Image (cartoon, grey):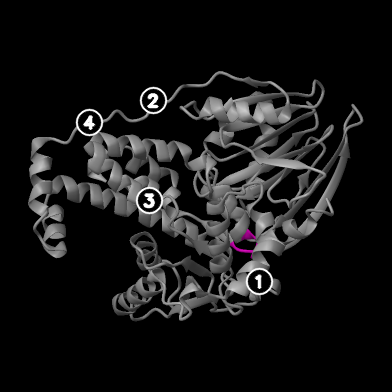
Amino acid sequence: FQIFKEQISRRGPDSLETLTCTTAENISLLFAASVLWLQGKTLTKQPIANNEAVFIYNGDIFKGIPDGCRSEGDTQYIFDLLTKVEPGNIHNELYKLQGPYAFIFYDKLNNKIYFGRDKFGRRSLLIGKNNNNIILCSVTQRTKDYEFIELPSVGTFIWDLKSNSFALHPFSQNDNFKKKVEELEQFLEEDINIRNTEIVQDQIFCEPSSNHIDMYKSLENMDIDDAVSLLLNNKDWMSKVTTLHALLIDSIRRRISSQPTFCKICIKDQLPCDHCTVGILFSGGVDCSILALLSDQFVEKNRPIDLFNVAFDETKDYKTPDRLTGLQTFQELQNLCPNREWRFNEVNITKSELDERRHMHIVDLIYPLKSVLDDSLGCALWFASRGFVDSNCRVLLVGMGADELFGGYTKHRAAFKRESWSGLHAILTEDWQNLPYRNLGRDDRVVSDHGRQLRTPYLDEQVVNYVRGLQCWEK
């Protein structure tokens, strides 16, 4: 535990506790958890334990908890829920919850450990081994003593301590499911008993109608304002825009309002303040600009909103494309929302600082991932989410998931050029199926290292379900 204590404590600056249990089979279990207090009227320290169970949880449940139970916080609610239900139904209760989570639940009575991540993989959970020892943790560091992999976001795992066997209640099965389970089996050198589950069929592709194609062609020679006006005057399109707008508004509202009304400094003594509590990772692109504009409705007008924009010194003057776009969109926000104090944080990083932080610290946060892309994206996110010394927000909104949902990558355009709509549909489906296994766990580890919570409005379950139900040519 001492190896991981510093990383764990940085993630949750409001509390750090440990608990040790010994099972009937003389197996020693050490639980350790830090807490970043964001839900409930008071801080809920972890681990939570009683005579029946021990619970460790990292997440944000935005839907699935009755309003009357909100005051006690989501951690206490889920613990009470899991201790009341039959063990065979634990996975069913978890599936009803909407929001990011990773959890470990020890059922003392049946000597079983339940653990897992939400279906999009928005919170980190790693699994490591060393001889007969197994460790589950949110973050680790490179060490010769343990080998780690990311736990795949495929469902609720059950570790039976009596028989030393593993089982899995899957969310569903898609093309990647079997591969990810086999990788975990090889790592553990154990078979995993997969319980019954449905096989979910992805949306069937349909070609756009001739009317839709004619409308798209008519847009080609229009300027942007006329093209948008034409689309919004179409009842079918306007209906879809209105629905998406309402879902995204609700997602942003929940992610802003679910936190105490204190900044990082004032929360220590719970002093009333009007300091910044919400920040946005801000490149000036479409996804983060929409988040910023809509967030203005839900952050108190006396509080500033911090916009974090990172640049590295390859250009010497830090005038990167994201910096220039960010400044331009920053000015637009000031014009659109003149009663808000928008604070544009220029996070400028020298090569020497990048190299030092990368090798001394960030590489451990990215681990067990180790590709060049993981390194470059992880470093950029770590510095961006750090912000300035006087940036005291505790919640960071990010546009992650928007590109996968709406086709924002260059490869999506290339697929469309090669194979038209069917090619775009295929690559969007592939990207979405890969999303839980790529970078969200890494990004959680990187941002949480600053004692801030990463919140992803585009990955709200209701937003995702709606957008994924649209044909690619409607997105």
What residue is rendered at 17% in x and 36% in y?
208
Contact between labelled residues 4 and 2, with CB atoms less than 8 Å apart: no
Image disc number at residue 321: none
Mark 2 residue type: Gln
Residue located beneath label 2 in the image: 201
Magenta stretch contains residue 206: no
- Local crowd size for mark 1, using a 10 Å CA cut-off: few (<14), some (14–19), many (≥20): some
Q: CA distance from mark 4 to mark 1?
A: 52 Å
Q: Can you say whether 120 is above or below 316 in the image?
A: above
Q: Nearer the viewer, mark 2 or mark 3?
A: 3
Left or right placement of residue 48 versus residue 439 in this view:
right
- Local crowd size for mark 3, using a 10 Å CA cut-off: few (<14), some (14–19), many (≥20): some
Give whichever of 134, 378 is nearer the camera. Answer: 378
The local secondary structure at tag 1 comes to helix
Q: Can you say whether 174 is above or below 142 in the image?
A: above
The residue range painted magenta reads: 448-452
Residue located beneath label 3 in the image: 403
- Chief SS of the magenta region: loop
Sequence-wise, the earlier of marks 3 and 4 is 4
Q: Nearer the viewer, mark 1 or mark 2?
A: 2
Mark 4 residue type: Cys
Residue located beneath label 1 in the image: 267
The local secondary structure at tag 4 comes to loop
Contact between labelled residues 3 and 2, with CB atoms less than 8 Å apart: no
The local secondary structure at tag 2 comes to loop
Left or right placement of residue 185 versus residue 278 in this view:
right
Sequence-wise, the earlier of marks 2 and 3 is 2
Mark 1 residue type: Ile
Q: Quadrant of residue 431?
A: top left
Can residue 263 be seen from the camera position used here?
no
Residue located beneath label 4 in the image: 206
